[in-house]
Image: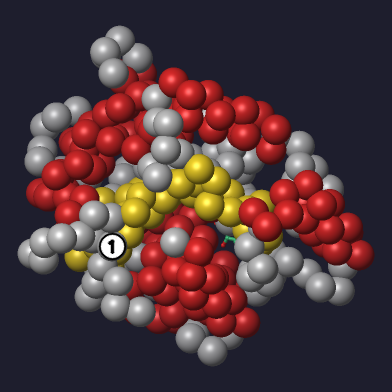
Amino acid sequence: MSNNLKAKIVALANQKGGVGKTTTALNLAAALALKGKKVLLVDSDPQGNASSGVGVYQSDGATQLYHCFMGEQETENCIHPCAIKTLNVLPSSIDLVGVEIELISLKDREKKLRQVLRPVRDRYHFIIIDCPPSLGLLTINALTAADSVLIPMQCEYFALEGLAQLIETIRKVKKNLNPGLYIDGLLLTMYDRRNRLTHQVASEVKNHFGKQVFNTVIPRNVRLSESPSYGQTILEYDRNCPGAKAYIKLGNEFLRRS
Ligand SMILES: Nc1ncnc2c1ncn2[C@@H]1O[C@H](COP(=O)(O)OP(=O)(O)OP(=O)(O)O)[C@@H](O)[C@H]1O
Ligand SMILES: [Mg+2]
């Protein structure tokens, strides 16, 4: 494997459910990989949607993130290939639910994922972590392991609700566990340009967060919701649809900012 790499580690976090974390993790990872970057997608959500979204399904006993957390497997033994050559995945399954409980009594329980990723960091340009919809230990571990956070948010009425709590959590992690952590950006997802509310929410978010908001917005596009059931990212499923174009654009903007 190549040397001199040190992956930038990015956590996709928002404790609100269904805002596009997984869709963004998958498709941003694919967009970066198709630009020739070596990317590791880490599925840190017991729902396992990021894993199945790239066609990695957990058969019984297959190595996965849970085994790394528990110290039962070396990280490299839990990394799986997928259809895009420069994209690897560290998958999860429902077993990961147990980690939240099993970690509680451990010393340095917030730093476990950082330790898990350390041995493979020099093999990738980017490590993208998909978080579950909570601010529990799995998300705290992701924020502690990460260099930066990308916050997807849906353009809907309650989008800003909960954001204060997320930002406070990021601030606490930065203060106590990971001083270098910063917010990479807020990403508006499921954007519907014909909907007035979308415009209202978008301008409110931009007033509040200014340059931290990505210029790229992700449109509502049914192709994006179809592709995971085929185990394909949008760039494999339908490279010319509006959703694919948006994630390619996001990848470019992300690279310019990084
Ligand atoms: N831009 C989009 N256009 C249409 N559908 C989308 C879009 N983004 C996401 N979806 C769909 O919305 C649902 C929620 O998206 P996703 O799973 O990415 O959110 P999430 O934040 O990861 O959810 P959870 O909090 O449950 O992990 C999924 O069915 C997904 O396919
Ligand atoms: Mg998800």
Pointer 1: what residue? Answer: 125
Task: Name the spot of residue 205 as percent of width and height, x first.
Answer: 77, 51
Q: Quadrant of residue 56?
A: bottom left
Q: Secondary structure at mark 1?
A: loop
The answer to whether residue 242 is above or below residue 8 is below
Task: Name the spot of residue 154 as percent of width and height, x first.
Answer: 70, 54
Number of other residues with Cα within 10 Å of mark 1, as a class: few under 14, some 14 to 19, many 20 or more: some
Along the viewing direction, whichever of 220 and 214 lies nearer the viewer: 214
The answer to whether residue 236 is above or below residue 189 is below
Q: Residue at x 28, y 62 (%)?
A: 125
In the shown orientation, is residue 73 left or right of residue 7? left
In the shown orientation, is residue 190 left or right of residue 115? right
Along the viewing direction, whichever of 135 and 91 lies nearer the viewer: 135
Residue 59 visible to the viewer: no
Q: Amino acid at mark 1?
A: His
Kindly tell me whether mark 1's CB lies below 8 Å from ligand 1: no
Task: Name the spot of residue 251 as percent of width and height, x first.
Answer: 48, 71
